[in-house]
Image: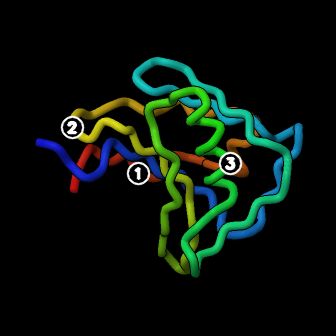
Amino acid sequence: MVYKHGQQVWGSVDISKQVTITASNNTFTFHVDDLSYTITIPVGTYTTSQQRHESELIQAISKAGAAQNIPVRFILGGMHYDEKYNVLILEHTDTINEHVIDQFAGNVIDTLFGQMKFNLPPRN
């Protein structure tokens, strides 16, 4: 069965505000099926708009990931607990099989991703 969404891993850090990336917090590392990937985010200040559901930060990460042919998409996700906020989602491009996306690290981890909030299998 082909699903609409591949394996997804949701972060826990609120990126709905302006996020400033410097040379000291610009690397994001993770594994997909035991292969390690590192993204270097260009230095700058990035804005995310909840109203328009778009993020300059996600766009920058997506561009860096596409240059390496990483088999995940970087998506802006919406969370709602006591208040609404946005998080980074990594979604595998394979919408049939389950995959392991883990070992999140890098000097931007606390600014960009935090801890794994959800790990969801492929679904519609």
Disc 2 to disc 1, C-alpha distance: 19 Å
Mark 1, residue position: 118
Mark 3 packing: few (<14 Cα in 10 Å), some, or many (20+)? some
Quadrant location of residue 26? top right
- Amino acid carrying label 2: it is Ile
Tell me the quadrant of the picture where the C terminus can be found.
Answer: bottom left
Q: Position of residue 43 (x, y in %)?
A: 85, 45
Position of residue 81 in the picture relative to residue 16 (left or right): left
Position of residue 23 in the picture relative to residue 57 (left or right): right
- Amino acid carrying label 3: it is Ala
- Amino acid carrying label 1: it is Phe
Q: Kindly report which numbered mark, 2 or 1, lies closer to the viewer in this rendering.
A: 2
Q: Is mark 3 on a helix, strand or loop?
A: helix
Q: Tell which of 52 and 38 is nearer to you.
A: 52
Q: Kindly report which numbered mark, 2 or 3, lies closer to the viewer in this rendering.
A: 3
Residue at image point 54% right, 77% down: 84
Q: Kindly report which numbered mark, 3 or 1, lies closer to the viewer in this rendering.
A: 3
Q: Which mark is residue 96?
A: 2
Q: Residue 60 carries which label?
A: 3
Which one is earlier in the sequence, the residue at label 2 or at label 3? 3
Position of residue 5 in the picture relative to residue 80 (left or right): left
Q: Is mark 2 on a helix, strand or loop?
A: loop
Residue at image point 88% right, 45% down: 22
Q: What element carries label 1?
A: strand
